[in-house]
Image: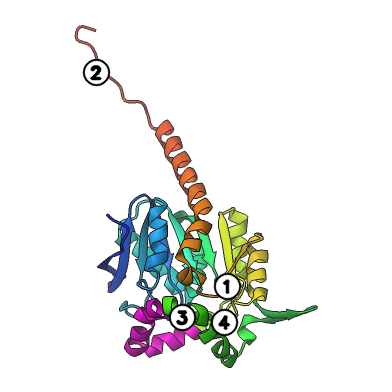
């Protein structure tokens, strides 16, 4: 399999699902952001393939042609993601990557199905509890009005300096999602706005799951206060990169560079587990000699 995503269909929880897959090696499950889909991230995901990964990029329910969930909750999205892993026959824990809303789904999946996740990377992820802070006053993400999201969304998704590079890849999924299922766009937007995964993150910290938190320093959709709250809950300093909410789309090479170390650590952990499992297998007995 080459480095270009191959588009396939499967069935998840009895309903059709669309996904892309490419590469070979460490299994990566990539969960996309709100309003987007599996096609948008083609260039960025190619960098993971070049790092020795087999990348699975599903269209989450309500987007990219995958039907809505009956209940639009993070628990339900996590159950769907777990069922997707089973449907495509991934037979070991995944290297899980989530961007924006996909980060919230990734957190919930890692929390609810710890046996499915080896390593978690959150990119400009929803899930931090804070929207803004001033001194001792902290306002939660649930208090953020929709109009404030609306002011920042176009600037962060469609940066003027990178318009010619970012706009075509985003529109490939975003326009079709708006036309195909505007109801899902609205329902998931409200779910994302209210998401507070502090308890789940603290549980992942207790379990000592390896977690990397990345954030673009010009992101106003996920503000600094939310990033800091997420890092505090997981017990990680996080890593600040140059860019806005869609930095991995604008600069896939930078994304590949940032991910190199995390992929190397996850592959080493995988190899260590495989050696340990091989060492615990009973030795094969040779045939008894005739006349013995």
* Residue 186 inside the magenta-drawn segment: yes
Q: Residue furthest bottom?
A: 147
Residue 54 seen: yes
Q: Magenta part mainly helix, strand or loop?
A: helix
Pointer 2 residue: 287
Q: Report the side of 224 relative to 5 (left or right).
A: right
Q: Nearer the viewer, residue 17 or 261?
A: 261
| First along the sequence among labels 3 and 1 | 1
Q: Is residue 79 above or below residue 222?
A: above
**Do labels 2 and 4 touch, CB within 8 Å?**
no
**Do labels 4 and 1 touch, CB within 8 Å?**
no
User: Which residues, given as a range, are shown in magenta?
Assistant: 167-189
* Residue 89: percent from left, percent from top: 30, 56
- Secondary structure beneath disc 3? helix
Q: CA distance from mark 3 to mark 1?
A: 28 Å
Pointer 1 residue: 127
Of labels 3 and 2, the one closer to you: 3
Report crowding for label 1: few under 14, some 14 to 19, many 20 or more residues within 10 A (C-alpha). Answer: many
Q: CA distance from mark 3 to mark 4?
A: 29 Å
**Do labels 3 and 4 touch, CB within 8 Å?**
no
Of labels 3 and 1, the one closer to you: 3
């Amino acid at each position: 399999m080459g480095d270009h995503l191959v588009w396939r269909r499967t069935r998840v929880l009895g309903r059709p699902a669309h996904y892309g897959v490419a590469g070979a090696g460490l299994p990566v499950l990539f969960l996309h952001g709100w309003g987007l889909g599996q096609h948008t991230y083609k260039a960025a995901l190619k960098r993971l393939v070049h790092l020795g990964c087999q990348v699975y990029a599903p269209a989450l329910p309500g987007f990219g042609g995958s039907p809505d969930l009956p209940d639009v909750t993070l628990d339900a999205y996590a159950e769907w993601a777990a069922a997707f892993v089973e449907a495509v026959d991934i037979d070991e824990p995944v290297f899980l990557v989530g961007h924006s809303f996909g980060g919230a789904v990734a957190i919930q999946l890692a929390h609810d199905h710890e046996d499915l996740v080896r390593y978690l990377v959150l990119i400009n992820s929803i899930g931090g509890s804070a929207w803004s802070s001033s001194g001792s006053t902290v306002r939660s993400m649930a208090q953020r009005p929709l109009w404030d999201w609306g002011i920042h969304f176009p600037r962060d998704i469609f940066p003027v300096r990178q318009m010619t590079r970012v706009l075509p890849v985003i529109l490939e999924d975003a326009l079709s999602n708006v036309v195909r299922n505007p109801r899902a766009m609205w329902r998931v937007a409200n779910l994302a706005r209210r998401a507070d995964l502090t308890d789940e993150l603290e549980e992942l910290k207790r379990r000592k799951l390896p977690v990397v938190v990345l954030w673009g320093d010009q992101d106003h959709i996920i503000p600094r206060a939310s990033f800091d709250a997420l890092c505090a809950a997981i017990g990680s300093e996080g890593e600040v990169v140059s860019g806005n909410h869609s930095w991995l789309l604008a600069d896939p090479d930078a994304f590949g560079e940032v991910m190199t170390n995390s992929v190397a650590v996850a592959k080493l952990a995988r190899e260590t587990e495989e050696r340990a499992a091989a060492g615990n297998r009973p030795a094969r007995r040779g045939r008894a000699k005739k006349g013995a």
